[in-house]
Amino acid sequence: MDEKRRKERLKADKEITITIISGVKKDPKEKLIYHISKDISVYGTKIQTNNFFPIDTLLKIDVTLKNPHQTITAFGKVKWVKSLFGINSYEAGVEFVNTSSETIQQLANYILEK
């Protein structure tokens, strides 16, 4: 199978904090803590969550990186969702959108170092 990714992904579990911006019927300020990013690139991330996010849901994602310790905030749109292991466990592909070039560069540097 050919790899279709445009950039290298860092395959590492990272704790993330997600804030829903739009696309679901919950309070858009609700923070969802202790979710996992399974892999990440400058274009997006795959997340594992206990919450279902419909396609096109806009999210604010805070990723805490180590060495050097920093938090990167990116904005993303859900592109696909897959149910895992039964009820209330999902993987979702999130494409970064409306994220500053400085943030993308920080992320690129971090991935390159790993």
Image (tube, helix red, strand yellow):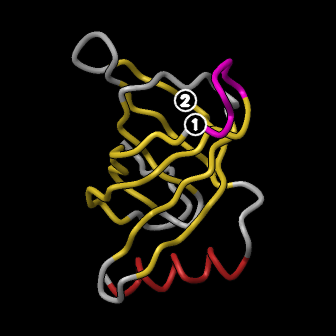
Left or right: 26 as drawn, with respect to 22: left
Q: State which quarter of the image contains the C terminus.
A: bottom left
Q: Residue at x 40, y 68 (%)?
A: 64
Q: Work out whether residue 77 or residue 24 is closer to the camera in this orientation and state it.
A: 24
Left or right: 23 as drawn, with respect to 50: right
Residue 77, picture quadrant: top right
Q: Vertical placement of 74 versus 95: above or below?
A: below
Q: Secondary structure at mark 2?
A: strand
Question: Magenta span: helix, strand or loop, mainly?
Answer: loop
Give residue 44's position: percent from left, percent from top.
55, 55
Q: Vertical placement of 16 versus 110: above or below?
A: above
Q: Work out whether residue 101 or residue 31 is closer to the camera in this orientation and state it.
A: 31
Q: Secondary structure at mark 1?
A: loop
Q: Residue at x 35, y 37 (%)?
A: 48
Give residue 46's position: percent from left, percent from top.
43, 45
Q: Work out whether residue 27 or residue 89 is closer to the camera in this orientation and state it.
A: 27
Single out the residue that lies furthest toward the right.
98
Q: Which residue is mark 1?
A: 30
Instruction: Tell which circle, 1 or 2, labels the residue nearer the N-terminal end.
Output: 1
Q: Residue at x 36, y 83 (%)?
A: 69
Q: State which quarter of the image contains the N terminus.
A: top left
Give residue 103's position: percent from left, percent from top.
63, 76
Q: Which residue is mark 2?
A: 80
Left or right: 77 as drawn, with respect to 41: right
Q: Which residues are magenta?
A: 23-29
Which amino acid type is marked by label 1?
A: Glu
